[in-house]
Image (cartoon, helix red, strand yellow):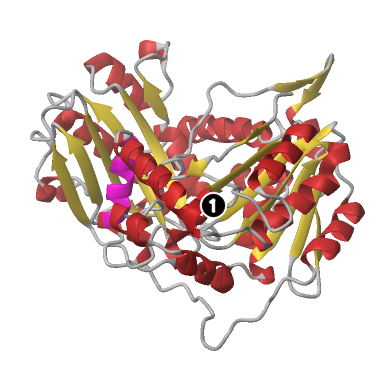
Amino acid sequence: MAASVCRAGSTVGRALVKVRSPTLLSLRRGHASVSYAQSLLGVPDTQLTTLENGFRVASEETGHATCTVGLWINCGSRFETEKNNGTGFFLEHMAFKGTRKHPQSALEKEVESMGAHLNAYTSREHTAYFMKTLSKDMPKAVELLSEVVQSATLNESDLEHQRGVVLRELEEVEGSLQDVCLDLLHATAFQGTPLGHSVLGPSENARSLTCQDLMEYINIHYKAPRMVLAAAGGVNHSELVGLAKQHFSSMSFEYEGDTVPVLSPCRFTGSEIRVRDDALPLAHVAIAVEGASASSADIITLMVANAIIGNYHITYGGGKNLSSRLARFAVEKGLCHSFQAFHTSYSDTGLLGIYFVTDKHHIEDMMHYAQNQWMNLCTTVTDSDVARAKNLLKANLVGQLDGTTPLCEDIGKQILTYGRRIPLAEWDSRIDSVTPKMVRDICTKYIYDKCPAVAAIGPVEQLPDYNRMRSAMYWLRL
């Protein structure tokens, strides 16, 4: 197994909910066939322990020869101000530049000798540092992760070097029009609030951030109760707890003065932002309404609704036989190159939307059919639509069983969000409980006659006027 020290980068625009096609009827483990029901019942329990300082340790033992272990931290760009926006992302770049015990070269050699992969990412509400390695090397992995988080060396020379790297990455992200479009969507939907900030921050901040800014960010946000040490694969929970006590029991849980960070409410604003560039070959457009928070009871129903809309890419086979109505329209009428329904959830709000890529001649038609599908969800969704969507979601559910890294990430995020990891059988039960009437009622609550947020970039002259898009958010019938 090749070793590497790398970064996953930010999760800008990567929160789109992807629905896999056909229903997964069985899983293959070796030569044995495991049914869907057996796969749910065979999932081991997630064990959770909280240390005296509030630091949480969670793990799931699957018996793999490898494991993924990582730190998930409740902080991200939403906790930043306009002045220091991008600090968390910058700090992620500095994380692997050495610790007080291991200079950068020594840290890289340690990871190399283990045949491990050390990685990190930053999102709007979470930061993660994690390592995939052989199970026998888990103690060393926990030790290195604790050093990266608690004793990273922040010096001016490394800072100046990484400043150039961050600025180049900002330029590269500008070339990813999906990321740009979804950042613009957040900027207009949550304008005037921290959730409107991008994860990477503006280039002006990248040029001006100092070591002192990074240290202040660590001192304010890297507190024991806001962290989860998660592990999945060939791990022993008791051993993991012992390692956590050894390396994290001294981590502070107190805040100085009045520095306790409190999330400010993020209001949703129906609005639009257009960046017209006729030199671009395709238009990237996103339309969204305010969705449910991660802890809302409505989230499963909205996931079913999104699965009904589905996703499409011009390379897909199937044509007129695709199950998604919008995908069939896309094929028959040549509406777009791709589209995807998404629901991005945060601690107290969310974005429920559709993102599509099309040429300049089909923007208006694609927007019309996309909004038409929203109206169908509110009024005419059928039993067969819901049954198909449930099967797609269940296929995704058992897909979480593939690999220790997705498992570890799921554990870390759920402990931060819910305080526990919701068992797959419970998710399955919630999906089963969704009815067509629930889909119609919940979609009416979130979509019908609501002001959308719209972001568009590229040759977008033919994008309808905002008032026309707003008027398509309801149907008048005699």
Asked if residue 49 lies in the magenta stretch, the reply is: no
Q: Nearer the viewer, residue 120 or 45?
A: 120
- In the image, taking residue 251 as reference, residue 157 lies left or right, namely left
Check disc 1 and report the residue beneath it.
94
Q: Which secondary structure class fits the magenta region best? A: helix
Q: Nearer the viewer, residue 456 or 431?
A: 456
Characterize the local packing of mark 1: few (<14), some (14-19) or many (20 or more) Cα atoms within 10 angstroms.
many
Task: Reply above or below: 341 against 266.
Answer: above
Residue 301: x and y in percent read: 50, 48
User: Is residue 311 in view from this perspective?
Assistant: yes
Task: Reply above or below: 1 against 274.
Answer: above
Residue 279: x and y in percent read: 13, 27
- Looking at the picture, which amino acid does disc 1 mark? Met
Q: Residue at (44%, 41%) from the top-left corner?
A: 305
From this viewpoint, which residue is outermost toward the front?
157
Residue 331: x and y in percent read: 30, 16
Q: Quadrant of residue 100?
A: bottom right
Q: Residue at (50%, 31%) from the top-left corner?
A: 19
**On-image quarter of the N terminus:** top right
Asked if residue 185 lies in the magenta stretch, the reply is: yes
**Count of residue discs:** 1
User: Is residue 197 in view from this perspective?
Assistant: no
Task: Reply above or below: 448 against 224.
Answer: above
Q: Residue at (49%, 41%) from the top-left corner?
A: 304
Residue range (magenta): 178-187
